[in-house]
Structure formats: structure tokens, C-alpha cells
């Protein structure tokens, strides 16, 4: 019996390429291909595909939340596909019900194998990626500081970060000052550079 797969990717060419690649294998049946997370979630809830592949860019913070919602649907398993994964994403996926993280540069054979294993109930996480992300021994920032810095990276203002995290503007500024000091950075931009190069955000 074929494995029913739903492909979700906001990039049209990438989505079509994934759909075409999976269509070459008889054991996979692509039952849907969508760019919008809400539409894909509605489809998953209605049709219950076996595996939902969520291909996303590093900056798409909603992808993980979408994968978690899919994972909560009975009979559905979610797998994230990206060029690289930040430590917060790996930690969140590993701690939750997301079935796997696969990097875009894997050979097709390995990609197909990951889908099969996820369908069988396994969790597929690259060992080296997971150890590096979960270790975090070299990161001096607290989870809250990382969260604030991540929002800065996403382009949020101090006021927007305060609203999202239910903090005061002054508290957000204090966190940012602490981040700059802990990283021995010149300013927030330099702190972002250091955090990005270290794959903390």
C-alpha cells in the first residue's frame, strides 16, 4: 500500500520539485501539495495523510508550530525539511511530537528512507545535528534571552517583542543589553552575528 504524503512548501518551484521527485516512486502517493500552512492543516485534518513534509526556510518561525499541530492529528506524522536547522528548532522538535528533521542536501535515497521510517513510527533526526543542537554547552544565553534575540533577528521591534512575550519594553531592553554583554558584542547587530554564526538562532 502506498504511503500518502502531503507536501507543504511556500516556495512554488521547491514544492513542485518535491512533488515531482516523490511522484517517481511508486510507494509514495502525493495526495496534496500546498503553500499555505492553514490550508495544509485543514487538508491534513480532513484527509489524514500518513506523512506531512514541511519544507521551510530558516526564517519561517511558523513552520515548527505547524508541524506540531500536524503531529497532533491522529494517523498523521510530520517531518521538517530545511537547508539548516537552528538549535531552538531542533530542541523544540526533539522535545515534541515532530517525527523528523531532514536536511535538503541529503541524497534522494536517504530522503525516501526517512519518509519510510517516519511512516513506520520511527523518529528521524540526524545524530550529529541533534547532539550539536541539544548540547548547547557553549551558549551563555538563557532561553528567554535567545527568544528575545530570535525576535530581533525576525525584525520585530522592542514593542512588538514585549507584546509577543508579555514583557515590558524596559525588560526587553534589559535582556538585549544582557545579551550584548554576555557575547562581548559591540551592539545588537554584532550580537546577532555571533548568535547566527554559532547557530544559536
Image (tube, grey):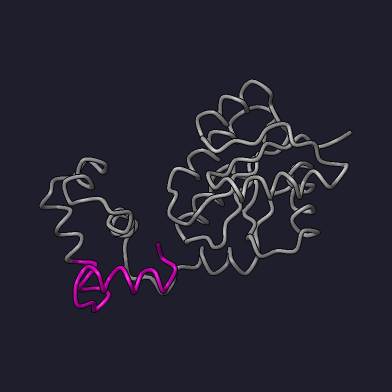
Q: Position of residue 122 (x, y in %)?
A: 73, 47
In the displayed structure image, the side of residue 48 where residue 152 appears, left or right? left
Q: Residue at x 24, y 67 (%)?
A: 179
What residue sits 19% from the left and 78% below the top? Answer: 186
Q: Where 7 sits versus 95, above or below?
A: above
Vertical arrangement, residue 132 with respect to residue 82, above or below: below
Q: Is residue 197 above or below residue 134?
A: below
Q: Is residue 77 left or right of residue 56?
A: right
**190 part of magenta stretch:** yes
**In the displayed structure, would residue 147 be above or below residue 29?**
below
Quadrant assignment for the C terminus? bottom left
The residue most toward the front is 13
125, 83: nearer the viewer: 83
Question: At x 77% / y 58%, what residue is drawn?
Answer: 108
- Residue at the image position 20 percent from the left and 51 percent from the top: 157
Residue extending farthest to the left is 170
Q: Which residues are magenta?
A: 178-201
3 relative position to 8: left or right: right
Point out residue 50 in the picture as x, y percentages from the top left corner: 73, 34
Residue 166 in magenta stretch: no
Number of numbered discs overlaid on the protein picture: 0
Frontmost residue, 18 versus 158: 18
Name which quarter of the figure residue 164 lies in: top left
In which quadrant of the rendered image does the N terminus lie? Answer: top right
Which image quadrant for residue 52? top right
What secondary structure do most residues of the magenta stretch adopt?
Answer: helix
Across and down, in percent, residue 44 comes to 63, 28
Report x, y in % for residue 118: 73, 45
Amino acid at each position: 500500500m502506498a504511503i500518502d504524503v502531503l507536501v507543504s512548501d511556500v516556495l512554488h518551484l521547491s514544492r513542485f520539485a518535491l512533488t515531482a521527485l516523490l511522484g517517481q516512486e511508486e510507494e509514495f502517493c502525493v495526495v496534496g501539495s500546498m503553500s499555505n500552512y492553514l490550508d495544509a492543516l485543514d487538508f491534513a485534518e480532513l484527509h489524514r495523510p500518513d506523512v506531512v513534509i514541511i519544507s521551510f526556510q530558516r526564517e519561517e518561525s511558523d513552520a515548527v508550530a505547524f508541524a506540531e499541530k500536524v503531529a497532533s492529528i491522529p494517523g498523521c506524522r510530520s517531518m521538517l525539511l530545511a537547508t539548516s536547522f537552528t538549535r531552538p528548532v531542533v530542541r523544540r522538535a526533539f522535545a515534541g511530537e515532530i517525527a523528523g528533521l531532514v536536511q535538503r542536501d541529503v541524497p534522494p535515497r536517504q530522503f525516501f528512507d526517512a519518509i519510510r521510517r517516519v511512516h513506520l513510527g520511527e523518529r528521524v533526526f540526524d545524530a550529529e545535528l541533534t547532539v550539536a543542537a541539544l548540547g548547547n554547552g557553549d551558549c551563555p544565553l538563557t532561553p528567554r534571552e535567545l527568544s528575545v534575540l530570535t525576535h530581533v533577528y525576525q525584525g520585530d521591534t522592542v514593542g512588538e517583542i514585549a507584546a509577543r512575550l508579555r514583557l515590558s519594553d524596559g525588560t526587553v531592553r534589559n535582556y538585549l543589553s544582557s545579551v550584548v554583554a554576555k557575547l562581548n558584542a559591540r551592539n545588537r547587530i554584532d550580537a546577532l552575528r555571533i548568535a547566527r554564526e554559532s547557530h544559536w538562532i
